Image: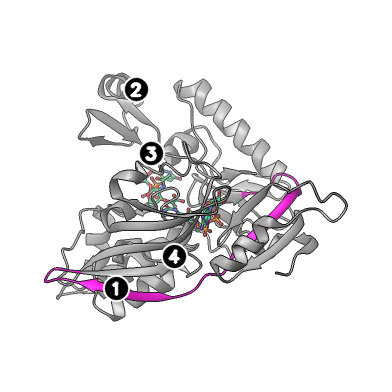
Amino acid sequence: MNIRQNTSLKQYNTFGIASAAKYFAVFNSVNDLQECLKFTEPQNVNKKPHNLILGGGSNILFTKNYDGLVLKNELKGIELINEDEEFVYVKVAAGENWHQFVLHCINNNWAGVENLSLIPGNVGASPMQNIGAYGVEIKDVFHSLEAFHKNDNATVVFNLDDCTFGYRESIFKRKYKDQFVIVSVTYKLRKKAVFNTSYGAIEQELEKMGVEQLSIKAVSDAVINIRSAKLPNPTEIGNAGSFFKNPEVPNEQFESLKIKYPNIVGYSLPAGTVKLAAGWLIEQCGWKGYREADAGCHAKQALVLVNYGNATGNEIFVLSEKIIASVQQKFGLMLEREVNII
Ligand code: FAD
Ligand code: EPU
């Protein structure tokens, strides 16, 4: 166990925010993690600092220095643990990079995660907010996970029904917030692909690519092309993807908004609600392409807030407050942040 002090977090978060952690350690095994969790402050051996588990740092905004212990997850390993006629069961250590895992699946002809190509971050965070894109969420391929309870010192298995997955939601963001460290996730992937190209943009992109024979590689490539065209690459411009969630409203509220705003973008859900495109709402309030010092609202995707270089986390946060207030004022809708604010 090597605990560093006053470590810069700039390279550990895709927003590129230059905050620092009072203590910082990397763990490569569950034993390592256990040792780190026992750490007490040198000047006060009765005090355990609070801690934060960090994956790829792609869904996090540091608004100040972190006055505790940041634990960077480097658990590695991908293992085929079981198979039957239809499925393979693949157990993946939480520190594996998500997109590298997707590519591994495509190379092995395991289907189900191709629509989730190019999402930054690590496998361990994928159940945290039930990552989703282009018509698929990880709950659709999730089998189980193992999580280490920080206080009980025990590993617990969670099956699909235990996780209460929802749109960008899970039990780990709510009831069990900050209690568990996810150490591995087992996915249930299909041997024979069932393609999901329902998201209009995928069909269009496949056509543009001239794809005649559908394959998981082709779907993955189409998703990669679409994402690369509109989402800023965090290695070029700091960001954490969608900063806000798309709000869900009852049908009746959508209908009355539509009278006033005939072009409002919304998708009907089976529950009798409509999911509104927050990017559209934000754009209508005039924020798209807005920049204040180094904090901004992306010019190609208004749902993405960006750091042009030296923005502080607090500047990004203040911009998000202004956006929430103006959407509330114009549309009477309260945007909820997707990004974890620290
Ligand atoms: P981090 O940012 O490191 O952590 C996120 C949260 O999870 C923190 O609260 C952290 O403490 C906690 N956490 C992380 N790992 C663990 C663990 N092992 N155990 C317990 N808690 C843990 N998301 C989508 O859903 N769909 C998208 O299409 C999408 N597109 C994106 C595009 C871009 C350009 C960017 C930058 C982000 C995008 N995101 C998207 C958001 C992000 O990629 C995902 O939320 C991703 O799963 C975060 O993974 P991470 O390892 O970086 O998590
Ligand atoms: N739109 C605008 N202006 C904008 C942006 C979007 O009008 O500036 C409208 C357009 O009409 C567009 C619609 O919003 O057709 C939807 O936009 P897009 O397809 O880009 O998707 P999104 O709703 O903005 C969501 C997820 C993304 C995910 C994509 C694809 C959320 C909060 N975001 O974005 O996830 O990749 O769909 O499935 O649900 C993330 O969570 O970080 C993320 C990037």
Mark 4–mark 1 distance (CA, rounded to whole Å): 33 Å
Which label lies toward us, 1 or 3?
Answer: 1
Mark 2–mark 1 distance (CA, rounded to whole Å): 50 Å
Q: Which residue is mark 3?
A: 277
Residue range of the region highlighted in magenta in the rendering: 61-87
**Residue 154 x, y percent position in the rendering:** 50, 54
Q: Quadrant of the N terminus?
A: bottom right
Q: Which residue is mark 1?
A: 81
**Residue 132 x, y percent position in the rendering:** 36, 52
Residue 73: assigned label: none
Residue 98 covered by magenta stretch: no
Q: Is mark 3 within 8 Å of ligand 2?
A: yes
* Residue in front for this viewpoint, 95 or 12: 95
Mark closer to the chain start, 4 or 1: 1
Q: Secondary structure at mark 4?
A: helix
Mark closer to the chain start, 4 or 2: 4
Residue 228: assigned label: 4
| Residue that lies at the very extreme toward the bottom in this rendered image | 107
Q: Residues within 10 Å of mark 4 (few under 14, many from 20)?
A: few
